[in-house]
Image (cartoon, rainbow, N blue to C red):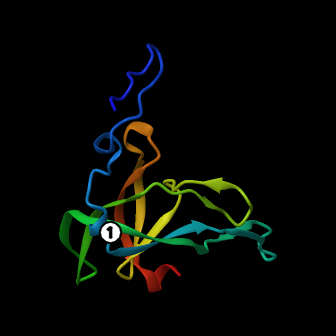
């Protein structure tokens, strides 16, 4: 039986190739956790000024493909270290924050992966199809230093 052509002006469903991820989902082998800043402002009685304590809270964990896109070696305070930029590719997701608002990942959040914490530098939803997210992150420290 032949398939009927779509009427003019009626959108045709995109092919699976168009909606496919730009990577193999079987490569999503890394668990990443999104952290949100739950800073608390408390009054400091001695000076009367507000003091902010930064507290990162894990929100959700998901599977992702992680690819190192840039790594540099540097010496800081005579200790060898490294800075790594990583691109995370994952299925599009939306999650609920502790205040009840729904959101997708933003640049104000952090990601933990392999016991390191990454600053989210950019979040991209290719073609705005809500199928996948590409997140660029820069390592800012160890998980034990932040949490």
Quarter of the image with the N terminus is top left
**Outermost residue toward the front in this view:** 1
In the image, residue 2 above or below residue 55: above
**Outermost residue toward the top in this view:** 8
User: Can you give x and y, in whole percent of width and height, for residue 85 in the image?
Assistant: 28, 63
In the image, residue 93 above or below residue 38: above
Q: Which residue is mark 1?
A: 28
User: Can you give x and y, in whole percent of width and height, for residue 146 in the image?
Assistant: 50, 79
The mark tally for this picture is 1
| Quarter of the image where one finds residue 91 | bottom left
Which residue appears at 45% of the width and 24% of the height? 11
User: Can you give x and y, in whole percent of width and height, for residue 133 in the image?
Assistant: 40, 53
Foreground: 81 or 57? 57
User: What element does badge 1 sit on?
Assistant: loop
| Quarter of the image where one finds residue 24 | bottom left
Which residue appears at 34% of the width and 74% of the height? 30
User: Can you give x and y, in whole percent of width and height, for residue 89 in the image?
Assistant: 34, 59
Foreground: 100 or 16? 16
């Amino acid at each position: 039986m032949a398939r009927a052509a779509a009427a003019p002006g009626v959108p045709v469903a995109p092919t699976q190739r168009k909606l496919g991820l730009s990577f193999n989902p079987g490569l999503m082998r890394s668990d990443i956790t999104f952290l949100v800043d739950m800073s608390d402002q408390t009054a400091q009685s001695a000076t009367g000024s507000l003091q902010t304590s930064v507290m990162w809270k894990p929100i959700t964990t998901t599977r992702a493909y992680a690819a190192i896109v840039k790594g540099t070696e540097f010496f800081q305070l005579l200790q060898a270290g490294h800075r790594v930029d990583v691109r995370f590719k994952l299925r599009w997701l939306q999650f609920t924050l502790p205040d009840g608002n729904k959101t997708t990942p933003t640049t104000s959040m952090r990601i933990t992966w392999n016991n390191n914490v990454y600053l989210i530098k950019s979040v991209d939803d290719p073609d705005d199809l809500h199928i996948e997210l590409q997140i660029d992150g820069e390592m800012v420290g160890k998980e034990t230093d932040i949490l």
